[in-house]
Amino acid sequence: MEYQKVLFLYKKLADNRQDMRQKITLIIFMILPVLILHSQNRRLEFSEFDINKRNEIILTITNPSVSGMTYKTLVKGKAESLQSEAITIFPEKSFYFPLRNELMIYNQFGLFTYNGELQTWMEHDFIPSFSTGTPISPLSLKPLEMSPDGRYAVFIREVEDSASLILYDREMNVSLNITNQLKKEYIHEMVKWSPDSKYFIYRRGRELFYFSIDQYLSGRIPAESFRNLGFQDIQSIQWKSGNYLYILSDKLLYRVHSSEFFTRSFYSDPFRKGVVWSRIPVSFDPVFDRYSLDRDGKRLFLIKNGLEGMVIPLVDHQETSGFLQQEPMLFTKGYTRIVNQKWLSNGTLLLFLRNNKENRGRILFCKAGDTGFSELESGEITGLSANERGNQFAIFKDESVDLYSGLTMAKLQTFPLKNSLSFFWGRDFYYSTGMNSITSISKSSGEPQIIGLSQLERTGFDLSGDLYGLSDEQWYKYNESKNWIPQDSAVELRPSRQSTAKYRIYLEDIRGGWYSSSLKIRNMEGYSTLDFLPVYQKQDLQNLPVQQEKPTRGNPWFFDHGLSVESNEITLVLNAVDSSEGVLEILNILEKYGVEATIFINGDFIHANPVETRLIADSGHTVGSLFYTWFDMSDSSYNIDQEFLKKGMARNEDDYFIATGKELSLLWHTPHYFINSEILDASESLQYIYIGTDLPINDKDGRWDREHTYVSEAVNQAEALLSQVHPGAIIPFTLGKNPGQEESLVMLLPMVIEELIRQGYEFVDLSEMIKSSR
């Protein structure tokens, strides 16, 4: 009876809306071109090109990196040979090796090392690089993990459609193929090294394997099947001192020593029959959760779904007496995320929290025995780092880096380092890699010295043809081999030139694809024109599959695909049904790739997940209706008529408005994409556009079939989906996962996005696709 009263009220409200809705629909489509922002605006931009009398060319390349940082790289080359190199080095990923006194930087242009003893830069050629002719990729950095001693590198090598995991020995200058035929989802974390550099754990799919450096050096490497650790998910493992490997599975934490690897993997399934180190009170999900251990394996910090953190004491699970002290918990709000955590040598836990919307950060700490977190600093904080010994840590700010004692929590020193991204402790020097420069700081004097430039504000040649650059109001002269010499006074650059007696250079725009343009070199003596840089990929529309145009039921209120001829556009749809696991991570992934999605949300999700609902509403993505509840509309026991649909749609609109203060867009679809004539008629009556898809709903059965086995299914489903994408496709995913579901297709979204970008597709907003298709 109560349910009937509620439906009556919603029906009355829905009926009063119809006249207004028709007017709003017309207005929305009239102003649509103004409101819509192009979703995938990630394109490689070329600018500030110049040529001197020695026919040396410079070019600034702006790269909107998937790491979330757009940066500029200055390229220098020769017109005669077309040889070019990056002469600024942006630190997308950095390593430091104290025993070698080497600082290593890895980015889309290659791998570079600064030798602190020789004070020189060198570029490595064991992985593909820009200087050896490899085009700049629009995708995420391929995995590269260095051993802590700096001798070994483990990385991905691609050959056509296959990929292998490679071990490179820098001292022997040899490579070894570790494993072949890797799946495309290798863009995620692949390897974890032991602290002594003698072992690493790698994954193939979800299965984990060990590799022993001693076995490699002796030439006695067992077959891969004998190195299977019998466990899954590299996110579940942590190395600690003494070469102990910890593995968190559900609520059990296992510990095994590296010396046991061969014996255990040869004779048994090691971890499921191994020693249980401790238990935790909540389940660990390796897909959505993360954890870290203190240095002694006595306490664990668990981050649930990126939003909640808890410190858990680890005790012998066989103990039957005693009690546990209350440990601190942390609940974040809104756009605040736990970005980083560091355990110090005295058991203090440091947390770095950041609110990206407000551009503010906080440093919290919790000492052993504390029942809560205390704030150390807040404001425009951008990062946190700690030294290997755990007795010092550094806090990054916009204009400085503050050095602290881990024992007293007192500030020791402040360095004038702007926009630092990483900070390392050497024997005689500190090293900082930043947005604009790479710096060494003397421990004795505290004096900073620029040892490399990350990017430049301005660059060009002087009248003699020498190259200069401006960074942080300081002029530098380029002196080859990545070395920049600071100048005592301002430098006057000559106007840029596009020609010499022999060559003319110019930019030619490229329609579609990753490169926005190409720098052309015209040889005026040989009457030939060549590209200065190798193009990433010729994204030719003719190479994309063509889907024959299908009738959309002759109904303007139904849309299930965009144009498939002379178009490379596709769009992404996310369905929020009930589970909110991974929502924050998915929103961050979309932001990194510059992809605007349409998120359909229902009442079940709104009621169960009000925080995540507000995050979705504030994310900038289009939000549509997924009816007020999730059920099988094809079931004949339900009477699905227009009256029922209007009530359900009105209820979902109101629930969303109450939760967010915002209105849903006039886009919708039913649970499981079920459709019939009543639903189409209701769409027209309500002035909603029904959104379908002509792709298989790969995650629907997996989501609801609780008896389904999910081992490795997500990757197979993603590959099957990729094989069926075509121009104009609407690609559906379901957010979250069910209890007991081991894998989630939506968490392979980076794999899907990257592969489709590689194939030449362009993601657009669904509303934009509708407009361009009609």
Image: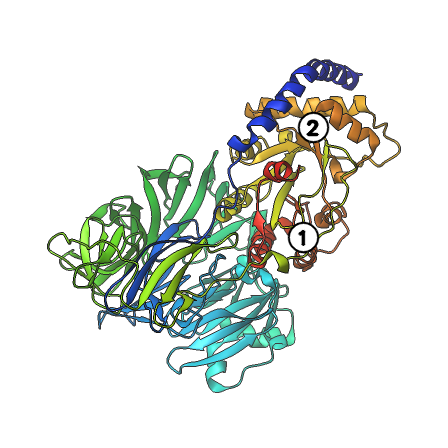
The one of 646 and 62 positioned closer to us in this rendering = 62
Q: x and y percent of residue 453 in the render?
A: 27, 58
Query: Is residue 356 in view from this perspective?
Result: yes
Q: x and y percent of residue 431 in the render?
A: 26, 59
Residue shown at 77%/19% (left/top)?
A: 3
Mark 1 Cα within 10 Å, few/some/many (few <14, many 20+)?
Answer: many
Query: Is residue 369 in view from this perspective?
Result: no
Image position of 424 (left or right of 767): left
Q: x and y percent of residue 637 in the render?
A: 88, 31
Q: Tell me how far mark 2 sits from mark 1, CA to CA.
A: 25 Å
Residue shown at 70%/13% (left/top)?
A: 16
Q: Name, please, the residue furthest toward the right.
A: 636
Residue bearing mark 2: 688
Q: x and y percent of residue 389 in the render?
A: 32, 60
What secondary structure is found at the residue carrying circle 2?
loop
What secondary structure is found at the residue carrying circle 1?
loop
Q: Quadrant of the C terminus?
A: top right
Residue 726 is tagged as: 1
